[in-house]
Amino acid sequence: MNKIRTAVAALVIAAGAFGAYAFSNANNSENEKVEFLNTYHYVGLDSEGRIEFASGPSTDPNCQPTGNVPCEFESTSSLTSPMTRDEIEAAADVKKWRP
């Protein structure tokens, strides 16, 4: 009878240890990649026709769902102003446009 109690106790301890180990790895940050979106908005064009922009959402009433010039865009990368339209479209997700 004593051997049965010892065996049961060992199984309970082992199951508890395995459960604690599995729970501790449930949210492993090594496997998760958290990406933050940077929002940018149109400021103007430079002398070479490149788009100048700044951080933050646009308050420009001319920003529309369609148009020719990116007006508000998001990227997981940090972007440096100015950029061409093609560079912005390659590096960011354009949300709004200017006519």
Image (cartoon, rainbow, N blue to C red):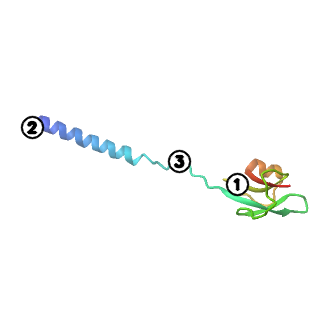
Q: Quadrant of the C terminus?
A: bottom right
Residue at 8% across, 35% down: 1
Disc 2 residue type (three-letter)? Asn
Label number found at residue 2: 2
Q: Which residue is mark 1?
A: 74
The Cα atoms of the two marked residues, 1 and 2, are separated by: 67 Å
Q: Quadrant of residue 83?
A: bottom right
Tell me the distance, in whole angstroms, between the alpha carbons under discs 2 and 3: 47 Å
Residue 21's disc number: none
Residue 1 located left or right of residue 54: left
**Mark 1 residue type:** Glu
Residue 57 at what x, y percent from top left?
A: 71, 62
Q: Which label's residue is closer to the chain start, 1 or 2?
A: 2
Secondary structure under tag 2 reads helix
Please, what secondary structure does the residue beneath circle 1 have? strand
Label 2 CA crowd tier, 10 Å (few <14, some 14–19, many 20+)? few
Q: Which residue is mark 3?
A: 32
Q: How far is disc 1 from disc 3 in space, using C-alphas?
A: 21 Å
- x, y percent for residue 14: 26, 41
| Residue at position x 17%, y 36% in the image | 7
Three-letter amino acid code at the position of disc 3 = Glu
Q: Element at badge 3?
A: loop
